[in-house]
Amino acid sequence: MSIDLSKIKSRLNTLQNAQSSKSVMWKPVQGKQVIRIVPYKFNLANPFFEGLFYYNLGSNRTILSPSTFGEADPVMDFANNLKRTGEKEDWRAAKRMEPKLRTYVPVIVRGEENEGVRFWGFGKTVYQELLAVIADPDYGDITDPQTGRDITLEYVSAEDAGKAYPETRVRIKPNQSLLDDNETKSASFLENQQKIEDIWTVPTFDEMKTLLENWLNPTDEVASDDTDSTPVQSKEVKPAGFELKQTAPVEQKATVETVSSNSVERASAVDQIGKDFDALFGE
């Protein structure tokens, strides 16, 4: 039996993407740090990338939903159909199962300019704060290389914040400033950027369908990957009478039929995954 080169190449590409993403992703640490949002080379009209992500969907990695790019996603279809059952537990499970919005923006970190442009990811609350500032005519385009403004971030641990999760506080500097005093370095920040859409491999419809089916019918043994993760569930969560099927290939949609309202275990399992996701990102 010969080696399947396509699978070898696919795995190599996944590992290379993972290594690449670690080098260009940035997360604030405890305390204060100053950053500057940089105009995004691949979309000068909008530096923010909005991604819809699944956390721990029967796999030891974060998965970017195809719906981010307007493509069909059977997991999202499943969640939408689950809401339509009219059962409170089903609705709650569906909400937790839906992909989470995670926004990324290119930044340079003051004092770490030699690291180049990296991507900072945050949740809905921080995103709304940043958009509100940019929409305010008193601030305007805070990303402008000539007249923009730096941002002070204060990352507070859950213990210090008195909450169940960490907190990120945002304060826009009142004074305008240059992206960098050195024009050559400033130009380098604008030119040397990675395309964030290339960091994640977007699963196909069939791959997402397989992930969903495996998640609904988990086995005791789960393939391990060398990334940090929360253990996946090991309980049967598929309700009696459940059937997942795909409609016409042209539409690439999945429909869900359920004849059971006994969804407490499923809701509990999905709810825990949602809480793990929220705690991970401080939502």
Image (cartoon, grey):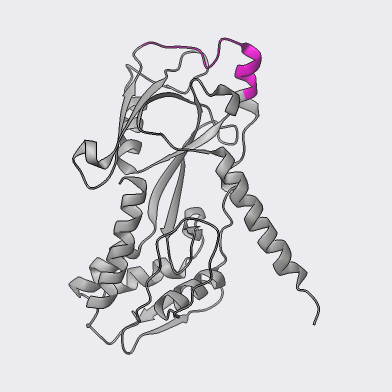
Is residue 88 rendered to the left or right of residue 271? left
The residue that appears at 67% across and 56% down in the rendered structure is: 13
State whether residue 102 is above or below residue 36: below
Direction bottom: furthest residue: 241
Direction right: furthest residue: 2
Image location of residue 33, percent across then percent down: 40, 25
Residue 236 appears in the rendering: yes
- Closest to the observer: 185 or 206? 185
Image location of residue 141, percent across then percent down: 43, 22
Please tell me whether residue 212 belongs to the stretch shown in magenta: no
| Location of the N terminus (image quadrant) | bottom right
Image location of residue 250, percent across then percent down: 56, 73
Is residue 70 rendered to the left or right of residue 77? right
State whether residue 86 is above or below residue 18: below
The residue that appears at 30% across and 73% down in the rendered structure is: 82
- Closest to the observer: 206 or 119? 119
- Closest to the observer: 18 or 37? 18
Residue 64 appears in the rendering: no
State whether residue 46 is above or below residue 62: above
Is residue 270 rendered to the left or right of residue 160? right
- Closest to the observer: 67 or 182? 182
State whether residue 216 is above or below residue 68: below
What residue range appears in magenta? 175-188
Image location of residue 84, percent across then percent down: 27, 73
